[in-house]
Image (cartoon, rainbow, N blue to C red):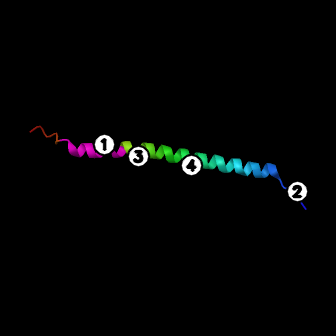
Amino acid sequence: MAKPNYSYEKRQREMEKKRKKAEKALKKTSESEAPPEAEPSPTQHNQPPMSGE
């Protein structure tokens, strides 16, 4: 019977953790960027038009 390659398994787990961490960071940055873009739109609708009349 072949012996298990623990270093390969460990490397695979580390790569999976790194990938998940990167995805989480990307999701967090995309979520933090989205609300500021969405907020100005409703406030612009509440302001009166700037026509000068």
Disc 4: which residue: 23
Residue at 45%, 46% (x, y): give it: 31
- Asked if residue 35 lies left or right of residue 19, the reply is left
Magenta span covers which residues? 37-47
User: Which residue is the extreme one toward the top?
Assistant: 52
44 versus 5 height, above or below: above
Q: What separation in Å lies between label 4 and label 3 (alpha carbons)?
A: 16 Å
Q: Which numbered circle lies on residue 48?
A: none
Residue at 54%, 44% (x, y): give it: 25
How dense is the environment of label 1, judged by Cα within 10 Å: few (below 14), some, or many (20 and up)?
A: few
- Asked if residue 46 lies left or right of residue 21, the reply is left
- For the residue pair 50 and 38, the one nearer the viewer reads as 38
Identity of the amino acid at label 3?
A: Ala
Disc 1: which residue: 40
Disc 3: which residue: 34
Disc 2: which residue: 3
Label 1: state its secondary structure. helix
How dense is the environment of label 3, judged by Cα within 10 Å: few (below 14), some, or many (20 and up)?
A: few
Q: What separation in Å lies between label 2 and label 4 (alpha carbons)?
A: 33 Å
**Residue 15 painted magenta:** no
Q: Quadrant of the C terminus?
A: top left
Task: Give residue 36's quadrant in the image.
Answer: top left
Identity of the amino acid at label 4?
A: Glu
How dense is the environment of label 4, judged by Cα within 10 Å: few (below 14), some, or many (20 and up)?
A: few
Mark 2 vs 4, N-terminal side = 2
Mark 1 vs 2, N-terminal side = 2
Mark 3 vs 1, N-terminal side = 3
- Asked if residue 53 lies left or right of residue 17, the reply is left
Q: What separation in Å lies between label 3 and label 1 (alpha carbons)?
A: 11 Å
- Asked if residue 27 lies left or right of residue 16, the reply is left
Q: What separation in Å lies between label 1 and label 4 (alpha carbons)?
A: 28 Å
**Total number of numbered labels?**
4
